[in-house]
Image (spheres, grey):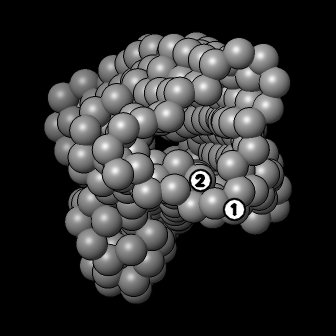
């Protein structure tokens, strides 16, 4: 039926039936509480200027989500936003459930998301999810990016998760972009191209932009593809950077930084010749006080800079031509035949 629903005033309104109205739903004050699935019609958008929308552990699909304030609590329920329109939401989402972004539109979040149950997932199945400000702190157990979708963190927004899986399905190119001072912390594994046949791309761009992960797996699934772009002082910090058995992997450095966070004799592991490319801006490997090594090789026209305390050992025959610079610690060349260090000029 036409028409919408507006919740105003203090107190709690509990809806016990699945509704089918097609108009907008708004919450300005008090609490709108679910006592069944889809108390807001799936064809209705939700706009919040205050108050609370409590899923009460039931599932809810929304046509869109927007608003300047307010709070959504999931319990153990699933909140799905299935929208082809682009909207912004400045309120919060919290609970022990899941949040799913569907539809071709862009959902911009400037408030916090906190979904911390071991089974909690932020899942992006279509369109784009944007974290747009320092007030946007996304905390969840897993982030899965599927079906040609994108997660974009900008303007000091932050993400904290145990697992970040970019390419959780075989469809489309899936992307995470961390730019303009945004941060992402991944305490376990960051997968680029997780599912068999999938594609995952990680872009880190701009001073202060940081992805801090334990293990980075590039091209994890069989026949998957993975790409890392480190640009304009963007930094990837990890205990290890590993190449899977996939069909295509590329890591591009263009004035970007790869920083160690533990001793590791196979810090960069499994990459083939031509996979680690130094573009015109060059790339920096910061051993950060640790002892790290690789037998993988860098190529391209850019310069390799060794930064930070500690030792970075190269045992492969590198072919980049932009020169070599050591601004901190020790760059060590070793291994059979490695005196043939074809890397152009050297600066210290």
Is residue 222 visible in the rendered structure shown here?
A: yes
Number of labels in the image equals 2
Residue 94 image position (x, y, % from top left): 73, 39
Which dot marks residue 71? none
Nearer to me, 250 or 221: 221
The residue located at (23%, 65%) in the rendering is 172
Q: Please name the residue that numbered disc 1 is placed on.
A: 36
The residue located at (75%, 65%) in the rendering is 119
Using the rendered view, name the quadrant where residue 121 is placed.
Answer: bottom right
Which dot marks residue 39? 2
Is residue 282 visible in the rendered structure shown here?
A: no
Q: Is residue 140 left or right of residue 83?
A: right
The residue located at (81%, 24%) in the rendering is 11
Nearer to me, 92 or 285: 92
In the displayed structure, would residue 141 be above or below residue 108? Answer: below
Q: Is residue 251 left or right of residue 34?
A: left
Which secondary structure, mark 1?
Answer: loop
Residue 223 image position (x, y, % from top left): 32, 83
Badge 1 local density, few (<14 within 10 Å), some, or many (20+)?
some
Residue contact between numbered discs 1 and 2, judged by CB atoms under 8 Å: yes
Nearer to me, 341 or 319: 319
Residue 226 image position (x, y, % from top left): 35, 62
The residue located at (24%, 46%) in the rendering is 84
Residues under labels 1 and 2: Cα distance?
A: 6 Å
Badge 2 local density, few (<14 within 10 Å), some, or many (20+)?
many
Q: Is residue 112 left or right of residue 127?
A: right
In the displayed structure, would residue 159 be above or below residue 272? Answer: above
Which secondary structure, mark 2?
Answer: loop
In the displayed structure, would residue 166 be above or below residue 112? Answer: below
Nearer to me, 30 or 147: 30
């Amino acid at each position: 039926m036409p028409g919408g629903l507006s919740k105003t005033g203090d107190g709690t309104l509990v809806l016990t039936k699945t509704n089918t109205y097609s108009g907008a739903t708004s919450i300005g004050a008090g609490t709108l509480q679910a006592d069944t699935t889809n108390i807001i019609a799936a064809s209705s958008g939700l706009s919040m200027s205050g108050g609370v929308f409590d899923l009460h552990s039931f599932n809810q699909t929304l046509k869109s989500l927007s608003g300047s304030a307010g709070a959504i609590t999931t319990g153990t329920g699933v909140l799905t936003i299935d929208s082809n329109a682009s909207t912004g939401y400045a309120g919060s989402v919290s609970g022990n459930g899941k949040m799913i972004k569907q539809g071709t539109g862009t959902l911009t979040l400037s408030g916090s998301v906190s979904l911390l149950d071991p089974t909690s997932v932020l899942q992006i199945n279509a369109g784009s999810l944007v974290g747009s400000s320092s007030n946007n702190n996304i905390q969840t157990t897993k982030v899965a990016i599927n079906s040609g979708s994108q997660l974009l963190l900008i303007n000091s927004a932050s993400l904290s998760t145990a697992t970040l899986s970019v390419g959780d399905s075989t469809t489309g190119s899936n992307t995470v972009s961390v730019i303009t001072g945004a941060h992402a912390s991944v305490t376990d594994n960051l997968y680029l191209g997780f599912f068999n046949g999938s594609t995952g791309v990680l872009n880190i761009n701009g001073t202060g932009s940081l992805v801090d992960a334990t293990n980075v797996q590039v091209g994890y699934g069989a026949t998957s593809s993975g790409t890392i772009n480190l640009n304009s002082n963007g930094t990837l910090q990890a205990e290890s950077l590993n190449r899977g058995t996939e069909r295509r992997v590329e890591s591009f450095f263009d004035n970007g930084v790869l920083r160690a966070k533990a001793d590791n004799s196979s810090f960069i592991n499994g990459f083939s010749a031509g996979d680690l490319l130094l573009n015109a801006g060059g790339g920096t490997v910061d051993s950060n006080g640790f002892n790290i090594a690789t037998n993988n090789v860098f190529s391209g026209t850019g310069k390799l800079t060794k930064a930070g305390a500690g030792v970075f050992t190269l045992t492969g025959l590198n072919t980049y031509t932009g020169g070599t610079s050591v601004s901190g610690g020790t760059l060590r060349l070793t291994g059979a035949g490695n005196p043939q260090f074809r890397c152009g000029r050297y600066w210290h």
